[in-house]
């Protein structure tokens, strides 16, 4: 709970009435107000509210308590330099007394609320939302990458604080990041308040000696007073507590999710309650999809601990949890879009893969966490097929290699050569020996749905030449091309033959 001090009370009263302070300052915390009469004993640290006619003699009030007088003083130099005195130009004693009580209650209720949140949910958005009526100005909390963990959004010409909203904000544009980074770098290690822009006040947020971000207070809606800066420092300290608790919560959540992932990947039983707990602890909304990524090690990371790579990947790719499975890193990612990973997530992933010299397969998106192992297999196959066909790439989508995967797995126990009919084998051998690519011509002809003109254009052949080739092909394969089923079979087998031959080169 925040300590109520003289500046907080002075500013609270000044908002309603003209107030004069005299006597020595008072730095110790103050306690709830008491109505003062001459016969009441005075206790250190308390606030006493009274009328001018009940003021004690000049020397009889202690220096470690605060006296507030409601109304004009009878003598202008009363109590001068002898004890702390606030004179409020209001003749209504109860109004002043209630205002002091309200100031106490307001600050204490606010401080208790944000302290409770910092120690429980560590919800930064809620902490900012509760603080808007205190500061009556825009508040923002940013992390080290200048991502807004919580930011106040104010409508055009909106002066009603109840209409202000607080939310997370998308990453800043590269231009703004470049602009703001250069400014904040100047104050990176500051432990004191600073003002990077006119009217904007900032405090860095530290966890231990590590800077985790900053909190800013904009004064464009109401001029700030001394008490606002006291409250701002208290708010920043509470945010630091929340950041520490967030790290603890994140670790507990991450460990729980990782244990569920490991069991699903190992085909161990996982009941529905554990699946629901993942959604609850990780705050996964209904309808949120998942994507599985499997990373294959590279030469640059062969001596780097896999646990370190998991941690680095989690920090690099938003909404990512990574575990070690079958000596590979397997990541579960909450994609930013319905179609899968967003451009930002892919950019972060690609940068990590480039730095680590790794390759990755990316599954299709899925809605049921229980299906993780199946989509893990998708990601593995995507990387194994993709790295073989396009070795220079760093990541591969399973969606791009579904046909290849189906072809690889459609032959079952038989080698491809045993499935290929003699006519196709003869056509392939003729293409190798005759100097005319009858094989490629037939494959393209089938791919083009037996469109002669289109196939001729793509092969840069005259129509008569194309017809001559097709006549020779038909002499070898007979009337099989008239049967749609055989057309499909030929296309599949020709794809398989080409894949097998390219693999064996």
Image (tube, rainbow, N blue to C red):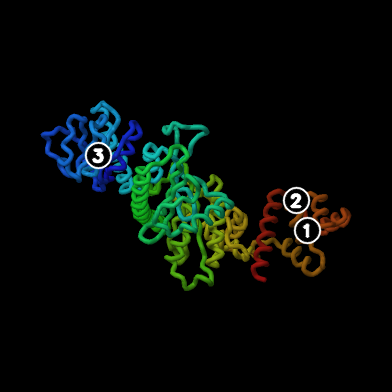
Query: Is residue 200 something one can see in this rendering?
Result: yes
Q: Closer to the N terminus: mark 1 or mark 2?
A: 1
User: Crowding at label 1, few (<14), some or many (≥20) Cα neighbours within 10 Å?
Assistant: many
Residue 94 in the image: x percent, y percent?
Answer: 23, 27
Residue 438 versus residue 343: which sits nearer the camera? 343
Q: Quadrant of the N terminus?
A: top left
- Location of mark 1 (residue): 441
Q: Could you tell me which residue is drawn at 45 percent across and 45 percent down?
A: 140
SS for callout 1 = helix
Q: Could you tell me which residue is drawn at 82 percent across and 53 percent down?
A: 457
Q: Closer to the N terminus: mark 1 or mark 3?
A: 3
Label drawn at residue 448? 2
Which of pointers 2 and 3 indicates the residue nearer the eye? 3
User: Crowding at label 3, few (<14), some or many (≥20) Cα neighbours within 10 Å?
Assistant: many
> Does residue 13 appear to the left or right of 481 in the view shown?
left
Q: Quadrant of the C terminus?
A: bottom right
Q: Is residue 58 above or below residue 181?
A: above
Residue 315 versus residue 358: which sits nearer the camera? 315
> Does residue 62 appear to the left or right of 499 in the view shown?
left
SS for callout 3 = strand
Residue 325 in the image: x percent, y percent?
Answer: 44, 63
Residue 235 versus residue 267: which sits nearer the camera? 235
Q: Work out how far the residue at label 1 is from the one at label 3, CA to CA, in angstroms.
A: 101 Å
Q: Could you tell me which residue is drawn at 73 percent across and 52 percent down?
A: 447
Q: Is residue 93 above or below residue 260?
A: above
Q: Work out how far the residue at label 1 is from the one at label 2, CA to CA, in angstroms.
A: 11 Å
Label drawn at residue 85? 3
């Amino acid at each position: 709970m925040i300590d109520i001090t003289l500046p907080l009370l002075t500013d609270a009263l000044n908002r309603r009435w003209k107030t004069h302070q005299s006597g020595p300052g008072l730095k110790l915390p103050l306690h709830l107000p008491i109505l003062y009469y001459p016969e009441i004993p005075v206790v250190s640290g308390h606030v006493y509210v009274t009328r001018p006619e009940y003021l004690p003699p000049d020397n009889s009030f202690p220096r470690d308590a605060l006296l507030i007088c409601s109304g004009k003083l009878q003598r202008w130099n009363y109590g001068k330099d002898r004890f702390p005195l606030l004179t409020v130009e209001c003749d209504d004693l109860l109004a002043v007394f209630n205002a002091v009580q309200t100031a106490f209650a307001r600050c204490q209720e606010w401080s208790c609320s944000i302290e409770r949140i910092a120690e429980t949910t560590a919800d930064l958005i809620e902490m900012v939302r509760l603080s808007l009526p205190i500061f009556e100005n825009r508040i923002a909390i940013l992390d080290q990458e200048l991502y807004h963990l919580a930011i106040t959004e104010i409508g055009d010409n909106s002066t009603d604080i109840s209409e202000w909203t607080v939310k997370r904000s998308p990453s800043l544009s590269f231009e703004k990041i470049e602009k703001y980074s250069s400014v904040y770098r100047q104050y990176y290690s500051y432990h004191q308040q600073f003002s990077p822009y006119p009217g904007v006040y900032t405090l860095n947020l530290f966890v231990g000696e590590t800077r985790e971000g900053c909190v800013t207070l904009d004064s464009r809606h109401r001029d700030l007073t001394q008490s606002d800066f006291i409250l701002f420092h208290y708010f920043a300290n509470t945010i630091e507590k929340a950041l520490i608790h967030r790290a603890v919560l994140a670790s507990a959540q991450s460990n729980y999710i990782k244990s569920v992932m490991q069991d699903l990947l190992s085909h161990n039983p996982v009941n529905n309650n554990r699946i629901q707990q993942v959604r609850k602890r990780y705050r996964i909304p209904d309808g949120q999809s998942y994507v599985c990524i499997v990373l294959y090690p590279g030469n640059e990371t062969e001596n780097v601990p896999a646990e370190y790579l998991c941690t680095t990947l989690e920090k690099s790719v938003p909404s990512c949890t990574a575990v070690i499975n079958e000596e590979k890193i397997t990541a579960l990612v909450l994609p930013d879009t319905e179609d899968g990973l967003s451009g930002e997530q892919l950019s972060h992933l690609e940068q990590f893969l480039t730095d680590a010299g790794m390759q990755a397969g990316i599954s299709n998106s899925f809605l049921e966490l229980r299906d993780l192992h199946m989509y893990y297999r998708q990601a593995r196959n995507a990387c194994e097929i993709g790295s073989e066909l396009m070795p220079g790439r760093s990541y591969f989508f399973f969606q791009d290699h579904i046909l290849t995967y189906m072809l690889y797995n459609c032959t079952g126990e038989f080698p491809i050569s045993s499935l290929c009919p003699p006519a196709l084998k003869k056509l392939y051998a003729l293409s190798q020996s005759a100097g005319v690519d009858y094989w490629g011509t037939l494959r393209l002809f089938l791919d083009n749905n037996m469109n002669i003109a289109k196939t001729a254009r793509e092969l840069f052949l005259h129509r008569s030449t194309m017809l001559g080739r097709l006549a020779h092909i038909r002499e070898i394969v007979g009337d099989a091309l008239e049967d749609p089923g055989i057309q499909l079979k030929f296309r599949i087998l020709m794809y398989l033959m080409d894949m097998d031959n390219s693999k064996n080169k």
